[in-house]
Image (spheres, rainbow, N blue to C red):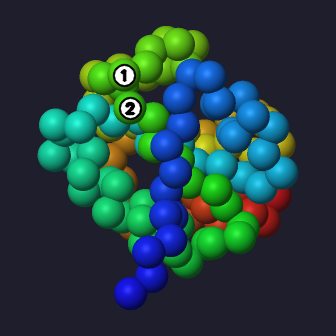
Amino acid sequence: MNSEVLINIVHDSNFQSNVIESVEPAVVIFEKCFWALAQVMSAILEKLADKYRGKIRFYKYNLDEHTSVSDYYQIEDSTTVLFFKNGNLFTRTGVESIEALEKILVSMIDQ
């Protein structure tokens, strides 16, 4: 069994270096631990992180512990996923199917 972490933790103090300054595109899920939909989205993103390993970086941002980045991007009280490319916000979404998320990833890689 592979024990590699596919989705790393990001927080206010390392968001700039891990996400904004990343050479690869980055995906960040903003979540609270008790949200059932966040757990579903995390499972979907784990599958995509495995598939796009080495092409896209995946992160989790805990809204229970951090607020600066979430305030900056106006994250509401719902599971939100932000997609970054070249240090810029590419797009954002809420709860989506794996197919819808993969379309965003493919378009992000292709541009």
Pointers 1 and 2 in contact (CB under 8 A)?
yes
Q: Nearer the viewer, residue 16 or 78?
A: 16
106 lies left or right of 94:
right
Q: From what the image shows, is residue 7 above or below residue 72? A: below
Q: Amino acid at mark 1?
A: Glu
Which residue lies at the image location 81% right of the left edge and 38% below the top edge?
21
Q: From what the image shows, is residue 70 above or below residue 95? A: above
Dot 2 lies on which element?
strand
Residue 97's image quarter? bottom left
Mark 2: give few (<14), some (14-19) or many (20+) Cα within 10 Å.
Answer: some
Q: Looking at this rendering, what residue extends furthest in the bottom direction?
A: 1
Q: Which mark is residue 110?
A: none
Q: Nearer the viewer, residue 3 or 73?
A: 3
Task: Decide if residue 36 is in sight here.
Answer: yes
Dot 1 lies on which element?
loop
Task: Decide if residue 74 is in sight here.
Answer: no
Residue wearing tag 1: 65
